[in-house]
Image (spheres, grey):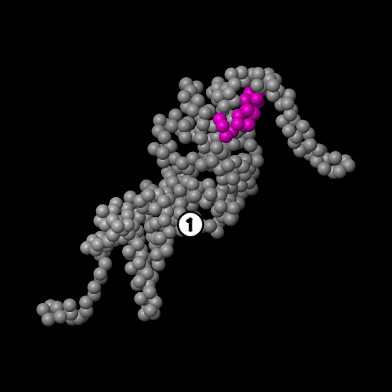
């Protein structure tokens, strides 16, 4: 082709040939490829785009080998947009590992929770467009303990990769709230949490919110907390918020922001419902899950029975060990009846959540 100079004014006298198309999806055009004895042109768009990406991977690897042989620098930067299109979830996970193995720097724009969930925390960047600016978020693993990283991976990334794409994350103590809140939100707003872009995550109790609020804050995702009101939980909340904001205040002086909500008077979710007009729904729920029509008889039979032993501050003069005191159930009177309902709910947490939520959802105007 250099002989074209005889007809053209080309002072450089060079010819460069790029044998690959600029568009990856066109790589298989003009080439006959049979995959599983079936022509590639008859496969779906997902398989075709996947095969094209693998051809690109092989091409880059070959260039790297040539660069090493010729002792020249070679470090490709590859931008890939939504490689998950038209692919099965399991194929998307496999695709991520193949992309990750490509030589050089990879920048992948994705809306796939499977691809985002397959990436390591430190590899992820969130891009969120605000009113006045676009924010880039990232997670610094150096800011987290190994146990906190494990919790995020186990409770968020491995099973809830869609959190990367949520508008709002609501954190709560456990399974009860996690099952109840979606129904209550739909009752209030008339739309499901999916429509609203809300994700609800139970943290398995104990007030261990820090890994999750750090995750959301680092990726510029709005977050809220609905917490139990026990004094030790509130203190843990303040410690977590102090750590998140790098505050120099004493923990007791920390004022929690409006997006952290907790029940008053040391209530939990169950006791709050009992005190706020949902006794009828709770009674119906317990009748269903305990398979009884007479709660009063069941409660009467439990009245006065042992609740177990608790450790006291009194020590034994002989062995210098703390003395334990046995507690007994007191279900007498109206207050005792409400205590009994709360105890029955607490003993059946894993059973009643969805049933009670449905009953509250279907309740009349007393819901607020």
Quarter holding residue 62: bottom left
The answer to whether residue 285 is visible is: yes
The location of residue 185, given as percent across then percent down, is: 46, 33
Quarter holding residue 318: top right
Question: Magenta stretch containing residue 348, yes or no?
Answer: yes
Question: Magenta stretch containing residue 302, yes or no?
Answer: no
Q: Which residues are magenta?
A: 336-352
**Magenta stretch mostly in which secondary structure?**
helix
Seen from the viewer's position, the closer of residues 49 and 203 is 49
Q: Which residue occupies 57% across, 39% down? A: 173
The location of residue 1, given as percent across then percent down, is: 17, 77
Q: Which residue occupies 14% across, 78% down? A: 4
Seen from the viewer's position, the closer of residues 172 and 162 is 162
Q: Determine whether, in the image, residue 175 is placed left or right of residue 58.
A: right
Q: Which residue occupies 41% across, 35% down? A: 192
| Residue at numbered disc 1 | 120
- Number of residues whose C-alpha sits closer than 10 Å to that of mark 1, classed few (under 14), some (14–19) or many (20 or more): few
Which secondary structure lies at badge 1? Answer: loop
């Amino acid at each position: 082709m250099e002989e074209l100079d005889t007809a053209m004014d080309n002072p450089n006298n060079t010819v460069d040939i790029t044998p690959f198309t600029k568009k990856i999806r066109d790589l298989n055009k003009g080439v006959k490829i049979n995959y599983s004895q079936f022509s590639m042109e008859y496969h779906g768009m997902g398989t075709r785009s996947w095969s094209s990406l693998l051809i690109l991977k092989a091409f880059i690897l070959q260039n790297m080998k040539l660069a090493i042989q010729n002792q020249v620098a070679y470090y490709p930067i590859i931008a890939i947009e939504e490689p998950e299109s038209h692919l099965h979830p399991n194929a998307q996970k496999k695709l991520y590992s193949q992309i990750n193995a490509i030589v050089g720097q990879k920048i992948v724009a994705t809306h796939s929770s499977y691809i985002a969930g397959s990436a390591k925390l430190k590899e992820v960047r969130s891009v969120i467009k605000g009113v006045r600016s676009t924010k880039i978020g990232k997670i610094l693993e150096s800011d987290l303990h190994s146990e906190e990283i494990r919790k995020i991976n186990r409770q968020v990334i491995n099973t809830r990769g869609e959190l990367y794409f949520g508008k709002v994350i609501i954190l709560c103590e456990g399974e009860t709230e996690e099952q109840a809140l979606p129904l209550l939100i739909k009752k209030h707003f008339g739309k499901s949490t999916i429509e609203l872009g809300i994700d609800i995550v139970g943290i398995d109790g104990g007030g261990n919110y820090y890994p999750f609020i750090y995750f959301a804050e680092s990726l510029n995702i709005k977050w809220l907390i609905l917490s139990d009101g026990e004094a030790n939980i509130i203190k843990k909340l303040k410690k977590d918020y102090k750590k998140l904001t790098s505050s120099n205040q004493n923990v007791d002086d920390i004022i929690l922001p409006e997006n952290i909500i907790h029940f008053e008077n040391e209530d939990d979710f169950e006791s709050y419902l009992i005190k706020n007009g949902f006794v009828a729904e709770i009674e119906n729920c317990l009748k269903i899950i305990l398979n009884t029509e007479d709660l009063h008889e069941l409660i009467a039979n439990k009245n006065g029975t042992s609740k177990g032993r608790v450790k006291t501050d009194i020590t034994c003069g002989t062995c210098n060990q703390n003395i334990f005191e046995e507690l007994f159930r007191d279900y007498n009177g109206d207050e005792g009846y409400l205590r009994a309902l709360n105890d029955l709910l607490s003993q059946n947490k894993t059973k009643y959540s969805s049933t009670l939520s449905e009953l509250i959802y279907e309740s009349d105007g007393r819901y607020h």
